[in-house]
Image: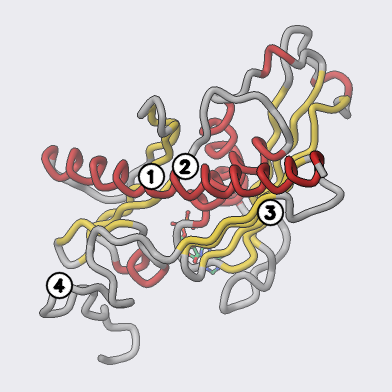
């Protein structure tokens, strides 16, 4: 392969560049309650993509003029650390990070019972520690865990994953190389229990049939991620319960 040339993304055995089958997720790791000073926190890995989320609130709003009389406001900052990419990224927020902060907030807002906390803010900080594709979806998965860890009442968790089309094949949970050379990139987030989509973006073109197939693939991944989210929360709180009952 020459420098800059597109690598072969699916080999003769139907395996991907990192050995996965098209419908396979990367190894997933999750932990909640990782930061002492935050009201809620979570750490999530999708393979080499690593994110940490801190949630503060419900708390008093600064500046005060943003206050809403009937519900909490949700604020969200998605940020890539300068060491998260192979080439140093400037720590200043880019247009991409500003856009992602907005779409991630919108993907989470609908699950939170904001009306229970009028005149307050709930602040979500997503820091990408290592970027290898799918940082927005890993960020959403981690943010919903951190919100749950903060004890904020929610309708459901939210889990996300990106589907891509590489070498003409639909693949689940794309990494950075696949993202770079993909024909299509389709990040999806859902409330898994309601099967309700809270984020859907698409770069590229799919036929209608491919689109529904891609959504089905995303849903399959999201249900697996949701299982890990539930297990992570349950193991954390059975530990806390055991400590309290001691
Ligand atoms: P997502 O991380 O949600 O897939 P993008 O599709 O915009 O979002 O980015 C794909 C991948 O490209 C990222 O996960 C990251 O690995 C890489 N990337 C994004 N922005 C930068 C950047 N400024 N410098 C280096 N790599 C980046």
In the rendered image, residue 214, in percent from the top left (x then y), is placed at 23, 46
What residue is rendered at 28% in x and 92% in y? 2
SS at mark 1 in the image = helix
Q: Nearer the viewer, mark 2 or mark 3?
A: 2
User: In what quadrant of the picture does the N terminus appear?
Assistant: bottom left
In the rendered image, residue 209, in percent from the top left (x then y), is placed at 11, 40
> What distance separates the C-alpha of mark 4 from that of mark 2?
27 Å
Name the mark on residue 93.
3
Along the polypeptide, which appears first: circle 1 or circle 4? 4
Name the residue tied to disc 2: 159
What residue is rendered at 27% in x and 50% in y? 204
Name the residue tied to disc 1: 222
Name the mark on residue 153.
none
In the rendered image, residue 230, in percent from the top left (x then y), is placed at 52, 42
SS at mark 4 in the image = loop
User: In what quadrant of the picture does the C terminus appear?
Assistant: top right
Tell me: is circle 1 under 8 Å from ligand 1: no
Along the polypeptide, which appears first: circle 1 or circle 3? 3
Bin the neighbour count of mark 2 within 10 Å (Cα to Cα): few under 14, some 14-19, many 20 and up. many
Q: From this view, report whether residue 36 is shown above or below residue 234.
A: below
> What distance separates the C-alpha of mark 1 from that of mark 3?
29 Å
Bin the neighbour count of mark 3 within 10 Å (Cα to Cα): few under 14, some 14-19, many 20 and up. some
Tell me: is circle 3 under 8 Å from ligand 1: no
Q: Residue 4, located in which quarter of the rendered image?
A: bottom left
Name the residue tied to disc 4: 14
């Amino acid at each position: 392969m020459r420098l800059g040339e597109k690598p072969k993304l699916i080999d003769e055995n139907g395996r991907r560049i990192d050995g996965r089958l098209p419908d396979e997720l990367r190894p997933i790791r999750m932990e909640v309650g990782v930061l002492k000073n935050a009201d809620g926190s979570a750490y999530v890995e999708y393979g080499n993509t690593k994110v940490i989320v801190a949630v503060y609130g419900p708390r008093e709003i600064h500046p005060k003029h943003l206050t809403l009389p009937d519900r909490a406001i949700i604020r969200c900052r998605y940020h890539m650390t300068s060491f998260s990419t192979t080439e140093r990224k400037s720590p200043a927020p880019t247009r991409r990070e500003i856009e992602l902060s907005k779409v991630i907030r919108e993907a989470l807002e609908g699950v939170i019972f904001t009306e229970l906390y009028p005149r307050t803010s709930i602040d979500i900080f997503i820091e990408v520690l290592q970027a290898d594709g799918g940082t927005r979806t890993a960020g959403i998965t981690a943010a919903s865990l951190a919100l749950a860890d903060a004890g904020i009442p929610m309708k459901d968790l939210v889990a996300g994953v990106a589907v891509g089309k590489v070498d003409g094949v639909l693949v689940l949970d794309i990494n950075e190389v696949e993202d770079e050379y993909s024909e299509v990139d389709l990040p999806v987030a859902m409330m898994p229990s309601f099967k309700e989509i809270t984020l859907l973006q698409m770069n590229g073109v799919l036929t209608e049939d491919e689109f529904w197939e891609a959504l089905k693939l995303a849903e399959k991944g999201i249900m697996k991620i949701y299982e890990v989210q539930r297990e992570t929360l349950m193991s954390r709180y059975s530990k806390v319960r055991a400590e309290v009952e001691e």
